[in-house]
Amino acid sequence: MADTHTEFGLVEYHAQEGRLIIRTPRFDFDSFPQLADKLVALLSASVVEKQWDADIHSWLIDFEGCQLFLKSEHYSESVWFEALMIEESQQELDFLAALLKRGF
């Protein structure tokens, strides 16, 4: 079981769908950018583009040459990674799932 004292962890990994649901500290729409910046920095990833609308943030990030969406929905306090190209991103998703399972 993951250490509950870590900030970020794995909730679920849907490998077939290219989606990782992430456990995070509590956030709201306005505080998500600080939370996301911290997560992106901890992963040594970079932000390519940021978009948001009424209740969802959707950031395109580059992680080791793999492009993923980092999405959040603040009403449910859900955060997840979503692969643009599932098969091509499998190795990176597996790595992120293992890392998040340990928590950090």
Image (tube, rainbow, N blue to C red):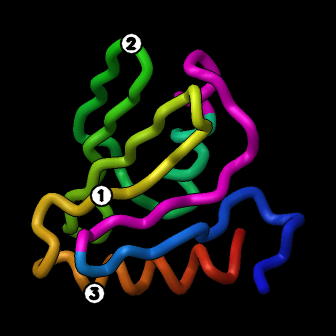
Q: Which residue is mark 1?
A: 82
Kindly identify the amino acid type of the residue bearing the numbered disc 3: Gln
Image quarter where the C terminus lies is bottom right
Q: Hey, what amino acid is under mark 2?
A: Ala
Residue nearer the viewer, 101 or 64: 101
- Residue drawn at x 32%, y 35% is 58
Question: Is residue 85 on the magenta stretch?
Answer: no
The residue depicted at 77 percent of the width and 80 percent of the height is 2
Q: Is residue 67 left or right of residue 14?
A: left
Expressed as whole percent of the image width and height from the top left, the position of residue 20 reads 43, 66
Three-letter amino acid code at the position of disc 1: Glu
- The residue under the point 20% across, 76% down is 89
Measured in 3D between alpha carbons, the distance from the residue under mark 2 to the one under mark 3, in whole angstroms, is 33 Å
Identify the secondary structure beneath mark 2. loop
Q: Which mark is residue 91?
A: 3
Establish if 96 lies above or below 24.
Answer: below
